[in-house]
Amino acid sequence: MNIQRFTDGRALSQDLARRILAAIDRQPGLVLGLPTGRTPLPLYAALREQTPPAGTDWSAVRTFNLDEFVGLGASDQESYRAYMERELFAAVGVDPTHVGFLDGRAADPDAECGRYEEAIAAAGGIDLMILGIGANGHIGFNEPAPGLHARTHRARLQPGTRAANAALFGGDISRVPDEALSMGMATILRARSVILMATGAGKAAAVDAMIRGPITTMLPASFLQLHPDVTVMVDLAASPR
Ligand code: F6R
């Protein structure tokens, strides 16, 4: 893994935004995998700032987000879909027909997961996957467990993960759904290139174990050690020893 350290989340995000925009300039039809959560908020702000009206053209970019809460859809303000519209898609001009998203309101969640895998394959696979990491080492909503799912699946969220998402729900943990749909580990590992971002002291132990520890389903991010092109961008607080 290629580890890159930055003084803070803002410097990290500015650098990553420049990289993403350069990748789109080189390959206008880039297929991006994207996370939600707190960590990428400064990245999405930097992408908004660095995409002036005559700047990078996002109109051919295709996106696939990692996950969505079961029970929530585009019209729910707490959904990850609504988060992405607010933080990135509308401001930079992603074509709505190029947005790939799991529908947390799908009547048949298993069929929805299968549809998502097919949509990613039909787009030619993910070129660049941007990831955050949970303090427990989860990526997407692949939580630590004795076994992991390879493909997109329905996932049960751990209490700590629900607490970490409470801000989206007015700070009320009881309103955070206890299930989500998430890309699986193989879905993530099939991306051609992966960049994981981690900021804050709360992520330091997970980052360290991801890089140095054994590959274990109890720390799902450790599977990234198997991928040939992973960059880990950290601020000083999240920096491994
Ligand atoms: C969200 C996702 C999650 C987050 C992780 C860290 O789409 O994929 O794995 O990246 O929970 O969340 P934050 O950034 O809020 O600490």
Image (spheres, rainbow, N blue to C red):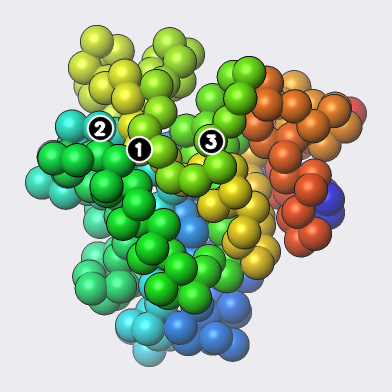
Marks 1 and 3: in contact by CB < 8 Å? no
Q: Which mark is residue 135?
A: none
Q: Which mark is residue 181?
A: 1
* Nearer-the-camera pick, 43 or 140: 140
Q: Residue at 30% of width from left, 73% of height from top?
A: 98
Q: Residue at 33% of width from left, 83% of height from top?
A: 59
Amino acid type of the residue tagged 2 in the rendering: Val
The C terminus is located in which quarter? top right
Marks 3 and 2: in contact by CB < 8 Å? no
- Please tell me how crowded label 2 is: few (under 14), some (14-19), or many (20+) other residues with Cα within 10 Å: many
User: For the residues marked 2 and 1, what is the alpha-carbon distance in whole angstroms?
Assistant: 6 Å
Upstream in sequence: badge 2 or badge 3: 2
- Which residue position holds label 2? 70
- Please tell me how crowded label 3 is: few (under 14), some (14-19), or many (20+) other residues with Cα within 10 Å: some
Name the secondary structure under disc 3. loop
Upstream in sequence: badge 3 or badge 1: 3
In the image: residue 60, left or right of residue 230: left
Amino acid type of the residue tagged 3 in the rendering: His
Name the secondary structure under disc 1. strand
* Nearer-the-camera pick, 58 or 214: 214
Marks 1 and 2: in contact by CB < 8 Å? yes
In the image: residue 127, left or right of residue 211: left
Where is residue 176? Give x, y as percent: 27, 20
Where is residue 145? Give x, y as percent: 59, 19
Q: Which mark is residue 149?
A: 3
In the image: residue 3, left or right of residue 39: right
